Image: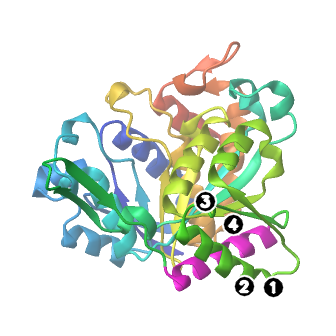
Amino acid sequence: MEKNIAVIWGDCSSPEIVKQTIRVLDKVAEKYGHTFHYTDAAMGGEAIDKYGDPLPQHELDKCLAADSVLLGAVGGPKWEGLPGEQRPEKGLLRLRAGMGLYSNNRPAKIWPQLAPASPLKPEIVAQGIDFIIVRELIGGVYFGKHETHTLENGEKQAIDSMPYSEHEIERIGRIGFETAQKRRKKLCCVDKANVLDTSRLWRSVMHRLQAEYPDVEYSEMFVDNCAMQIVKNPAQFDVIVTENMFGDILSDEASMITGSIGMIPSSSLGDGTRGLYEPIHGSAPDIAGQNKANPIGTILAAAMMLKYSFDMDEEAAAVEAAVNRVLDKGLRTGDCMAEGCTLVTCTGMGDAVLAEL
């Protein structure tokens, strides 16, 4: 099979881990008889430095022409002082919108080998952590109007709007129900319906959809309670569906209870098979150029790309199994290092995964 992959190398430490991921994809292609063509696309800090724009149209066009996009994390201290529209993160928002990616799926699953690294009590971890957060990606407050103006008394006032329409909620709601059908058939919609009109509209749409999925156990939870329950009893969750900002915050929280944010991949999909695949961690500017970053989250994101965009289930499973065997051998990067394990570099972790493929 022949596939075209747009590669956004990202900023700071990201190119180091993307490099290891490309090595893994090349090994998969060699082993299973595929051909992967790579097209470099600039986004974030790299694009700002080259073009003065976090995502020029010609770079977005490269992504739209590809079968899928592999993304390294963007941003860093170098670009933090720029105006909002010129910041690296704005490129990511425009990329998601330009590709029509409205669903972000972030798994929160603890690897048994990393259980001691979880900040939760062992008795909580022992009950199991294995759930997915389905986050609406191109609506809500991140894509609403943002205004700052001066009042008559000279005081500044900022307003951020949080719009949602029924069709936006319905399409992400269906993904939530369908994801639950493929798992343990439990779906929890997380909102703030005691305060927000948007949340009350979410509930109205979700109640309508609920009738179409009688095999799924449906529940609702306020976002503040959910934030507590994720650390108190994460085993209760199977699939969480929620709006953009809540999903952003909860998925970061969920990633930390698994032992290392560097292990967690993410997929963003729309109506077609083309997706955006990335680790959920940031660009780690503090260790840039030191060969210390953990590439596993990005390697597992590539495995998700093989599975969900390319229908290469066997190849994806092989990558995940290789990672599992590497962890079994006690190899760790610094972010998840534990007593009795062996510390390896970013390149060393890439070498180890390749050896198991």
Q: Nearer the viewer, mark 3 or mark 1?
A: 3
- The alpha-carbon separation of the residues under discs 3 and 2 comes to 18 Å
Q: Nearer the viewer, mark 4 or mark 2?
A: 2
Residue 76 appears at what percent x and percent y?
Answer: 28, 38
First along the sequence among labels 4 and 3 = 3
- The alpha-carbon separation of the residues under discs 3 and 1 comes to 22 Å
Q: Residue at x 16, y 59 (%)?
A: 53
Residue 272 appears at what percent x and percent y?
Answer: 52, 82
- The alpha-carbon separation of the residues under discs 4 and 2 comes to 33 Å
Under tag 1, what secondary structure? loop
- The numbered dot on residue 208 is 2
- The alpha-carbon separation of the residues under discs 2 and 1 comes to 6 Å
As for residue 181 lying within the magenta part, the answer is yes
Identity of the amino acid at label 1? Answer: Ala
Residue 247 appears at what percent x and percent y?
Answer: 56, 56
Q: Nearer the viewer, mark 4 or mark 3?
A: 3
| Mark 4 touches mark 1? (CB < 8 Å) | no
Whether residue 145 is visible, yes or no, is yes
Q: As rendered, which of 87 and 337 lies closer to the eye?
A: 87
Under tag 3, what secondary structure? loop
Residue 48, relative to residue 336: is it above or below? below
As for residue 246 lying within the magenta part, the answer is no
Q: Residue at x 16, y 52 (%)?
A: 48
Q: Determine which residue is flagged by label 4.
A: 313
Identity of the amino acid at label 2? Answer: Arg
Identity of the amino acid at label 4? Answer: Asp
Under tag 2, what secondary structure? helix
Which range is magenta? 165-182
Magenta span: helix, strand or loop, mainly?
helix
Q: Determine which residue is flagged by label 3.
A: 192
Q: Residue furthest front?
A: 153
